[in-house]
Image (tube, rainbow, N blue to C red):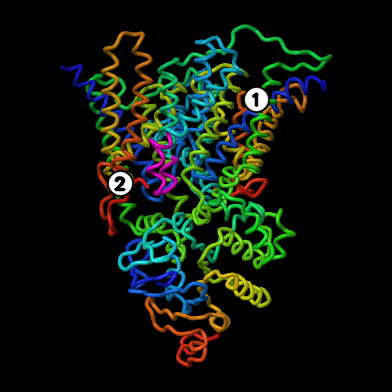
Amino acid sequence: MSLLEIDGITGGYGDSDILHDLSMRVEEGEVVVIVGPNGAGKSTAMKSVFGLLTIRGGAIRFKGEEITGLKPDQIVRRGICYVPQVENVFPSLSVHENLEMGAYLRRDDFSASLDRVYDLFPPLKEKRRLPAGSLSGGQRQMVAMGRALMLDPALLLLDEPTAGLSPKFMDQIFDIVRSVNAQGVAILMVEQNAKQALALAGRGYVLATGRNRHEDTGAALLADREVAEMFLGG
Amino acid sequence: MLMEFLNFYLIPGIVLGSIYALGAVGVTLIYGVLRFAHIAHGDMMTTGAFLALVFVHGLGWSVPVALIPSIILTAILAVVLDRLFYRHLRKGAPIVMLMASLGVGLMLRSAVQVIWGVDPIAYVSGIQRPVVYGEFRIFTRHILIVVGALVVMGGLHLFLTRARLGKAMRAMSDNPTLARLSGIDTDRVVMATWVIAGGMAAVAGVFLGMDGHLHSMLGWHVLLAVFAAAILGGVGNPLGAMLGGLIIGVVEELATYPWIGTAPLLEPTYKAGVAFAILIALLIWRPTGLFKGKVL
Amino acid sequence: MEGILLYIVGVLTLGGIYAILTLGLNANWGFTGLLNIGIAGFFATGAYTSAILTSPDSALYLGGFGLPIWLGWVASMLTAGIIAWPIGKICLRLRSDYLAIATIGIAELLRLVYRNEAWMTGGSRGITPIPRPFDGWDPILAQFLFLLVVALVVLAVYLALERAATSPWGRMMRAVRDNELAANAMGKDIEARRLEAFVLGCMIMGLGGAVMSSYLKFFGPDATDPLLATFLVWLMLILGGSGNNRGAVLGAILVWFIWSGTEIVTGFLPDVLASRAAYLRVFLIGLLLQLVLRFRPEGLLPEPLHGRKSGRSAG
């Protein structure tokens, strides 16, 4: 039984379908990357896990339990956290308050998780009283990821975490993804920077027009000429 | 000359501004969390004022004490009105909620008229004498209003910055989707928003009634000023709304001061025009307000 | 028998005048989704304009121009439009909530001005007598003829708006209303179109005011309850079928009949209850809107196909 199983799902927003019979899985502690050309439905695939899509066929299972169609707050409770690509912080709240909101569902003392996040993202510690909206793009991304980590999820969904960031920050983000994964968190990541992402991925899925195209280990996909041709520059 | 300015213009301006601030904060909170302009807010203030009247005239309570049941009842009323009339409209365009609130306001106003008629009523009859400190005169009710408003707003500020639910309210106002993604119980936040907005509207209404007479159009007449204050402070920004309310109240009163010569600069009958002028000026030059709120 | 007939003529006449107002509101709301809550302000502007221009000389108000009635009515559209233009110019580039609040403001401001500038408007006393078409004719015939005039005005406005709706201008309006992003991409000047729809609607409201003041032969701050009138027109539009000229007329007549009908009922009550009952009627009207929004937001006549899928609701 995989940690996350997306089993032949078809669905979209409103009346039209974007995903067609899509299947994916993430094992415990794995890093899985979704790549593909623009409009391939990569972000949509991730949103389907988080209950943000209308699913018309297939099923999604987490730890063996079916979670298709559950609402976001119910999914969060089960141990999956999601970092959207844009608008992923509360701009008028301080960094610290953003993290607190991440831990909203926790009734216990979450200072250990807070420390872990500040260790992962040292710049946040010194800026913790500043409003998140006043930070730079890269630091905002840190806040976004930190917020999602506050619930100690078993699975973290990242939607293009390096979008719009400078190369320096890009490397930082990938390092952080590695560190987070090293702590045992499984990661499902959509990335436009395919090359770098596949380099640290255990496995990868190539999507096109909402369907599966390829599936293989990160290394194999990187080496595959056809894949590289489909959408290089990653 | 200075004392006249202070006693008859500045202090009434601060008093009025405090009342506007209370109303504006409610409007801005509702806008931030629910994303619509609550046109019935003025009439909610009127309802709060009249609910207090029931306890003052009916049970002989003093006005400040009658505030308590008024706050509770108006808060409950706000939640009930949301359940009945706004909740089912939330999925659609926010403009429809605005339309519904126009109707809800009308219902509140006419309910007051059915029960109490349209003639002005006073909480307490008789002339009240001001407290005099040398040349400085201030009415007790004015002290009560300003202090009361400060206490309420201070309490709200604490709630928004220290309480978990308060922070969740700010989070939802910033980004409702992300709030849901973080597991925040949005229904609970919405209910809290109505409770707070309703309670504050009751306080504003009672204060308005204290400072003059109660009548069914009490709240409607300040609606424009309250909205202008919320927009001035930046929609969605409670602190901004407080400041905006104060500014508009003071400017409104000061506008009738005889700055040039002996006649008032602005005819007192056109005081309502001040808020309107400020609103138009904002819409032309700075719709986001002083503190960069969300543009409506 | 005669009394009942005259009563019905009266109700139809007022219903017709409200139909003019509702058609004007539809030009705002149905064409481009603009929420205009300042109906009473534009209505009053038209009413006073026509009253001032057509009334005889008086020390109590500005009069003595002695213009023909039809000219007064046309002028009322102009003044309403002149006031609407700057409001629209300022607010339309912002979201609709702003326009709603600004129109509330302008209506309040106009109300204050009209009440206070007594040299012009007669203050709280108002302007009277205002000439009416067929003055001096046989009174009963005059009533019927005036109803005919109102019906013609409604028809004229209706046809004009229908023509506009099916014209390229109208189709573009609907494109703007339904999908602003796409319309923007097509390079349409959205703001200009919106402004046109706003001003047009307000001009029609002004016309409604003019017709009303001629009908009542009197106009003043208490001629109508501005908030109630504004709300009634909105209810008429929503109940009839928002976005829909036919629905606007239907809604106006229907709601006005309901409103007048309830007045008969309260007329049977003893005096002491009767005045309070009037407010109860208002309460019920407010409740009626909530019920419509809940159970039939698209109104009685949902928007017909003008080349797109129908069933557009109040939202």
Contact (CB < 8 A) between labels 2 and 1?
A: no
**Residue under numbered circle 2:** C244
x%, y% of residue A45? 42, 70
x%, y% of residue B111? 41, 22
Q: Which mark is residue B267?
A: 1
Nearer to the camera, C285 or B74: B74
Is residue A163 visible to the viewer in this orientation of the structure?
no
Please name which of the two marks, 2 or 1, marks the residue nearer to the observer.
2
Residue drawn at x 37%, y 27% is C214
Number of disc labels: 2
Nearer to the camera, C17 or B249: B249
Q: Secondary structure at mark 2?
A: loop
Q: Quadrant of the N terminus of chain B?
A: top right
What amino acid type is highlighted by mark number 1? Glu
> In terms of image quadrants, where is residue B199?
top right
Residue drawn at x 37%, y 41% is C24
Residue lying furthest left in this view? Answer: C1
Is residue B293 visible to the viewer in this orientation of the structure?
yes
Residue B56 drawn in magenta: no
What amino acid type is highlighted by mark number 2? Asn
